[in-house]
Image (cartoon, rainbow, N blue to C red):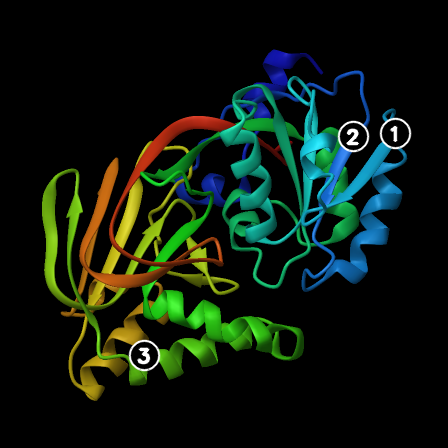
Amino acid sequence: MSTGNLAIKCAARGRAVQSREPAKGVSAPRGSGPLVVVANRRAGRIDEFGQALAVLRTGVQPVVVVDVSDAALEESLRGVAGRTVVAAGGDGTLRVLVQHLWQRGLLADTVVGLLPLGTGNDFARTVGIPRGPRSAAGVVLSGCARPLDLLADDGGTVAVNAVHYGVGGLAVKHASPLKPLLGRTAYRLAAAWAGARAAGWDVRVECDARVLFEGNVLFVGIGNGRTIGGGSVLWPQARPDDGLADVVVASAGSTVARLKVARALRSGEPGGANRVMTGRGKSIRVQGQAIPYVADGDDCGSQPSRSWSVHPAAWRLLVPVIE
């Protein structure tokens, strides 16, 4: 198959369903060096890594595995420009790899593969990477590189799928120790607990320099992908290659109001609740009271002000070829 034909057929299933149009991409460079796989040994489904690894080793390149927390990670990623590097884990593992490449100026010249072995794997859902380890490894070997947007803040942090402020940030923190036992249910339980107890945070949320909301909030979500928490659709219209971030803001209120907000967020139609505001833009700013937040499930602490910008087509991810 020629590169041109491959580009036409390259699409993520998530976008194909939404827009009925294929996402453009190109065949992935394989390079002359080994295929580096950055694995998270604590990922929720890392016990399935061996199945994926067996498929990867049928390719023409030797495979080198390095742990995402290994001190040798930086050394292992030297000279990867023009090659493919694979993340084996969830959204957080993918974010760490992309962050590393971004900070060192290597991201634009490197193609990223993903073996979705985490608990939630929300970004894999958005772009259509299969959940099965063997099928996902097949995409790494024969998929095509889709240009995707990247969220980056003014402190140097990036996110590939989503940023959660407030209750969303607290939920991720409290869910972490429960994930090995409860899986995706851990996030939903933690979110319910945090939503019932949190007093809210006084902030102003701006979208492209226009005020989307100012007041007491429970939750601010900035999405590049469509889902959080292992499949809960929070940004139903989001596309990770349209140059825009989707924003959801849930204001605080009575217990009954909070339950209505939670129901609307779970339904995949957040705009259906009168305490939920939505927007889309290239630049998002959250400013006011220090508010906890997480990027792709990684704790970023609490900050009184952060600005997020969308960097269009900043990186390329291997996705299935649509036949």
In the figure, is residue 216 to the left or right of 241? left
Q: What residue lies at 84% left-to-right and 34% top-to-bottom?
A: 63
Q: Is residue 281 visible?
A: no
Tell me the kind of residue under disc 1. Pro
User: Disc 1 on helix, strand or loop?
Assistant: loop
Judged left or right of residue 158, residue 135 is right
Q: Secondary structure at mark 3?
A: helix
- Front position in the image: 63 or 100: 100
Q: Is residue 54 above or below residue 188?
A: above
At label 3, counting other C-alpha atoms closer than 10 Å, the crowd grade (few under 14, some 14-19, many 20 or more) is: many
Q: Mark 1 or 3 closer to N-term? A: 1
Q: According to the image, label 3 marks what residue?
A: 195
Whether the residues at callouts 1 and 2 have beta carbons within 8 Å, the answer is yes
Name which quarter of the figure residue 263 lies in: bottom left
User: Looking at numbered disc 2 in the image, what kind of residue is underneath it?
Assistant: Leu
Residues 132 and 220: in front is 220
Residue 264: x percent and y percent? Answer: 28, 71
Name the quarter where the N terminus is drawn.
Answer: top right
Is the residue marked by circle 1 packed among few (<14), some (14-19), or many (20+) residues within 10 Å?
Answer: few
Picture quadrant of residue 59: top right
> Observer-nearest residue: 87 or 116?
87
Q: Disc 3 versus disc 2: distance between alpha carbons?
A: 43 Å
Tell me the SS state at disc 2.
strand
Q: Which residue is mark 1?
A: 62
Q: Tell whether label 3 touches label 1 (CB within 8 Å).
A: no
Determine whether 13 is above or below 304 in the image.
above
Quadrant occupied by the C terminus? top right
Q: Residue at x 37, y 66 (%)?
A: 168
Image coordinates for residue 256, horizontal then vertical, percent = 20, 87
237 shown above or below 217? above
Determine the residue positioned at 69% across, 25% down: 78
Q: Which residue carries the number 2 mark?
A: 35
